[in-house]
Image (cartoon, rainbow, N blue to C red):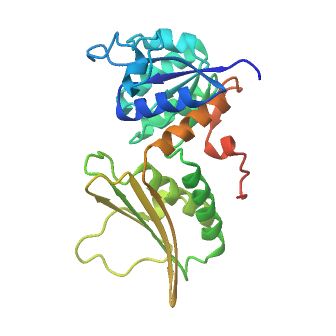
């Protein structure tokens, strides 16, 4: 076995951060480079393994993201959109690969990621689950085969009551895949909400509906509805650990890669129209 890839975790004391920590420590090919939190977090200075109830590692929760990027081969970010510019700046400074799983990014943030990929390797994915990656590709293929004047496309997603963005990043990625399959620009055909006298559904429209409630990790269904038949493709996440698993797989894959923007398709070895 070659040298271990050193993986750093931003927001390591949060819900996703702890799952990422557990996943990194479970991988024989990975080494934990460290984890950081905001400067006012009371867990700073605690042994990082205590976050998941494991035996002490002698590695403390820190607040120095600059040092983490300097040490790590790849850093995973599931924090919040406002922190992204700082993290990209650090990735560029140290030429450290970055895995971005943060959702709710605006166009400015996406542009920032795109510009940075001239100099550093970045993986950007709205959903890092292997299952979602595969059904996204399947949605693109079906959309290419099922004519817009016969099959209407609707996407329904449900998440827990605390989720702050809607529709979800995964729902938008599924909608984008459908639009790519039909070779249309998504922002010309999507409908994010309906209320009142909206009239008949236009041919080719891609609808998105968001539901919030309870503790749902993430449910997504893409519906292809025609006269006399309906095709439904669904993915239901019962544990956030699937996102941590995919993110760590992505971090291991991207460490040492040339500069560029990558997605889970590249991580899983999927070509443009291939499952």
Seen at 41% across and 59% down, the residue is 219
Q: Is residue 187 visible?
A: yes
- Location of residue 146 in the rendering, given as x and y in whole percent from the top left corner: 61, 76
- Location of residue 35 in the rendering, given as x and y in whole percent from the top left corner: 45, 18
Location of residue 159 (image quadrant): bottom left
Q: Nearer the viewer, residue 159 or 177?
A: 159
Seen at 56% across and 41% down, the residue is 246
Q: Nearer the viewer, residue 81 or 212?
A: 212
Seen at 43% across and 20% down, the residue is 49
Residue 50's place in the image compared with 64, above or below, is below
Residue 196's place in the image compared with 100, above or below, is below
In this view, the residue farthest toward the left is 196
Q: Is residue 183 visible?
A: no
Q: Nearer the viewer, residue 126 or 249?
A: 249
Location of residue 40 (image quadrant): top left
Residue 208 vs residue 67: left or right? left
Residue 68 vs residue 156: left or right? right
Residue 64's place in the image compared with 162, above or below, is above
Residue 36 vs residue 228: left or right? left
Seen at 32% across and 18% down, the residue is 38
- Location of residue 30 in the rendering, given as x and y in whole percent from the top left corner: 62, 24
Location of residue 114 (image quadrant): top right
- Location of residue 197 in the rendering, given as x and y in whole percent from the top left corner: 24, 78
């Amino acid at each position: 076995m070659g040298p271990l890839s050193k993986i750093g975790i931003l927001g390591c004391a949060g819900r996703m951060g702890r799952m990422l920590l557990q996943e990194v420590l479970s991988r024989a090919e990975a080494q934990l480079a460290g984890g950081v939190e905001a400067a006012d977090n009371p867990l700073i200075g605690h042994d990082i393994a205590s976050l998941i109830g494991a035996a002490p590692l002698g590695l403390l929760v820190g607040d120095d993201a600059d040092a983490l990027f300097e040490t790590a081969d790849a850093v995973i970010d599931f924090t919040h959109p406002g922190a992204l510019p700082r993290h990209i700046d650090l990735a560029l400074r140290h030429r450290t690969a970055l895995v971005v799983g943060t959702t709710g990014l605006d166009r400015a943030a996406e542009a920032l990621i795109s510009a940075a990929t001239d100099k550093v390797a970045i993986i950007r994915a709205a959903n890092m689950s292997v299952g979602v990656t595969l059904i996204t590709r399947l949605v693109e293929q079906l959309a290419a085969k099922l004519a817009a004047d016969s099959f209407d496309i609707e996407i329904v997603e449900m998440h827990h009551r605390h989720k702050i963005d809607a529709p979800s990043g995964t729902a938008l990625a599924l909608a984008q895949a459908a639009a790519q399959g039909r070779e249309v620009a998504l922002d010309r055909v999507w409908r994010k909400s309906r209320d009142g006298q909206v009239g008949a559904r236009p041919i080719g429209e891609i609808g998105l509906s968001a539901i919030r409630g309870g503790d749902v990790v993430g449910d997504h269904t893409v519906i292809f509805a025609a006269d006399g038949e309906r095709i439904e493709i669904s993915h239901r996440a019962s544990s956030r650990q699937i996102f941590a698993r995919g993110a760590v797989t992505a971090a291991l894959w991207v460490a040492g890669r040339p500069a560029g923007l990558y997605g889970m398709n590249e991580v899983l070895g999927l070509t443009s129209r291939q499952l």
